[in-house]
Image (tube, rainbow, N blue to C red):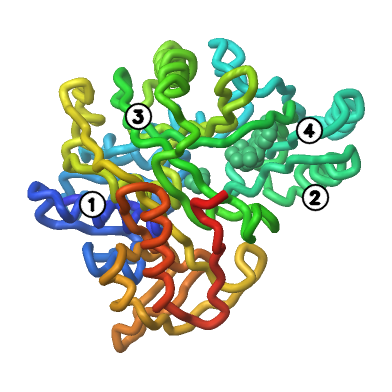
Amino acid sequence: MKVLVVGGGGREHAICWKLAQSPRVTELYCAPGNGGISQVARCVPIKATDVEAMVRWARENAMDFVVVAPDDPLALGMVDAMEAAGIRAFGPRANAAVIEASKAFSKELMRNYHIPTARYETFTDLSAALAYVRRQGTPIVVKADGLALGKGVVVAATVEEAEAALREMMEDRKFGDSGARVVIEECMTGPEVTVLAFCDGEHLVPMLSSQDHKRAYDGNRGPNTGGMGAFCPSPNYTPEIAAACMERIFLPTVRAMNAEGRPFKGVIYFGLMLTGEGPKVVEYNARFGDPETQPILSMLDTDLMDIFQACVDGTLDQLHIQWKPGAACCIVLASGGYPVNYHSGYPISGLEEAEKLATVFHAGTKLDGDGRVLTAGGRVLGVTAVGANLEEAVEKAYAACRPISFQDMHLRTDIGRV
Ligand code: AMP
Ligand code: GLY
């Protein structure tokens, strides 16, 4: 099979790495890909959001199957466009990807179908939003409605902070049109767990539970990032909690999407908070998480191509998905200054040494004319190791980070330990 993966980060490297192990994948392409992905797939220089060019290329090059990994092309309807061109594609259609692309939609879905989540109100009017915050008091959570690279959420400790966030989103349009509408919700407390699940429109199979580390610095301090590291499975996610999530959250979500005429095929991402009142949904995403995918796919024993096809065919119930025992951990090596401002183009050394100890997924890298690997983004690498237990996986991953260096390299030293 000729397979194209859309995207170019660490998540896409992990997906390509896993697909390259499938005997059924004879030719693997990735658009746009990155320096590391080019070691396992042929990179095609098309932007992930260029739906028209992507479909044209996939048709002209006779792709049998396309995997759309990032949120923007999903929200833009890339899966719909591939299907219209007669190409099988993995990922939700635009009408289902809206579960991530609009928080107002997902909150209303949860309200209507009694899926546990934080209480909330939606606003398009700044003064009404401000009045609501003053009435509710703090702490309170302010969210831009649309996609904002995971950065459109402010957990405000004071009314002033909430006001500032609302003004930035609604008045200054810090996130563009994503902030035209905001969701204001109750602040929940408890450990956070992520569960990704394969979905074929009807059946749902959860992957191993995971946890990511969103803040830039040790001790969960500093600005929110796309994720500085992740591990799986989460020790907080007991079999009892898993059963409760399946019954009260996962299956009701799949049924709700069907009832709305928006069957979900692809990976659904449940961001959960384990509150005193039971597990509740913090957010849905319509795709694999980054960096959660790196440790999760490192633990997968089943052929990923078989799973993707079963999701598209609606036959997920016939597949037995297997996981390795133990745990996996991914540590992100980022450019100094990420996520605020940083420089790129620095050579990376020590990769070969690291690869003897762990799998090094590339997030933001490129090759120069001589084949040297250069930094090319905020998150640069995701060093990922598997161990007999979490402690061992964490230790192995950190040991593999040691030989790697590039100018201003930044990593957290407490991944999997907090
Ligand atoms: P989101 O982009 O919706 O996942 O939000 C980013 C982060 O903000 C989450 O991982 C939580 O840590 C935090 N957060 C979001 N919503 C809430 C909430 N209602 N209560 C407490 N924390 C929240
Ligand atoms: N790691 C968070 C996300 O992928 O949205």
Residue 136 image-quadrant placement: top right
Between disc 3 and disc 4, whose residue precedes? 4
Where residue 104 sits: x, y (%)? 63, 27
297 or 27, nearer to the observer:
297
Rounded to the nearest angstrom, the CA distance separating label 2 from label 3 is 39 Å
Left or right: 112 with respect to 187? left
* Mark 4 in CB contact with mark 2 (< 8 angstroms): no
- Residue at the disc numbered 3: 206
SS under mark 4: strand
- Residue at the disc numbered 2: 172
Where residue 139 sits: x, y (%)? 81, 34
Neighbor class of circle 1 (other Cα within 10 Å; few <14, some 14-19, many 20+) is many
Between disc 1 and disc 4, whose residue precedes? 1
- Residue at the disc numbered 4: 140
Residue at the (63%, 17%) spot, across then down = 277
Amino acid type indicated by mark 1 = Lys
